[in-house]
Image (cartoon, rainbow, N blue to C red):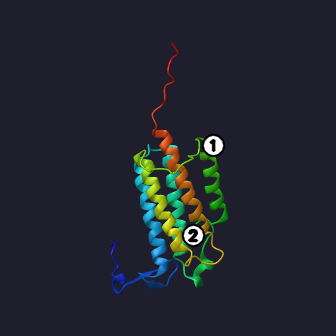
Amino acid sequence: MRIYTKKGDDGTTGLYFGGRVAKDAPVVAAYGTVDEAQAFLGLARAEAERRSELDELLVSLERDLWVLMADLATAADNRSKLEPGVTAVTQEMVAALEAHIDALNERFEMPTEFVVPGQSRAAALLDVARTVVRRAERLAIPTAAEGSFVVPYLNRLSDLLWTMARWQEGQSLPSRAVPKER
């Protein structure tokens, strides 16, 4: 199988379950930005120890983004073909992000001032991914189907990525020894 089909040479791209739109259509910009966010999650994952909690969480989020891209890339007349949790974002997927946020928040003290990214490479990459997810969210607002959970998912994902970056910053801080009394 060849990677190139030449079908897009006319400036169009295929949608999931059929149909074609211009490559510069708003929906393509939205799911293309989600694809970019997924790539940044992959960069952050490259910094994680294999099979670690961070690695497994990032793999799960990357897989969720495939579902989200399918949801966005489906024309209105084909939405009935979407399968919840497989090709359509669900309310349960949004709730799972909230559960991850809550669980991670219990592990560190929330910053009380603006955060300056860059405490660690993994945290910085998570912050970049967060900003790309925020852009994807803005682009998805006018393109997501009515009743879709795409926008709430992206909103919660950006919150989770912020939380994950702070968690990873805490992981990289040197331990502070308590001075011995004399």
Q: Relative to 130, is 100 above or below?
A: above
- Give, as a three-letter code, the residue at label 1: Glu
Q: Circle 1 — which element?
A: loop
| Residue situated in front as seen by the camera: 66 or 128 | 128
- Give, as a three-letter code, the residue at label 2: Thr
Please indicate, yes or no, whether residue 15 appears anywhere in the rendered image. Answer: no
Q: Relative to 99, is 84 above or below?
A: below
Q: Relative to 5, is 91 above or below?
A: above
Q: Disc 2 vs disc 1: Cβ atoms closer than 8 Å? A: no
Read off the residue under disc 1: 106
The nearer-to-camera label among 2 and 1 is: 1
Q: Position of residue 180 (x, y in %)?
A: 51, 17
Read off the residue under disc 2: 87
Mark positioned earlier in the residue sequence (2 or 1) = 2
Q: Which mark is residue 44?
A: none
Q: Position of residue 126 (x, y in %)?
A: 46, 53
Q: Position of residue 83 (x, y in %)?
A: 61, 70
Looking at the image, which residue is at 56% across and 59% down? Answer: 157
Looking at the image, which residue is at 48% across and 80% down? Answer: 26
Q: CA distance from mark 2 to mark 1?
A: 32 Å
Q: Position of residue 76 (x, y in %)?
A: 58, 83
Locate residue 24 relative to residue 66 in the image: left or right.
left
Q: Circle 2 — which element?
A: loop
Q: Residue furthest top?
A: 182
Quarter where residue 43 is shown: bottom left
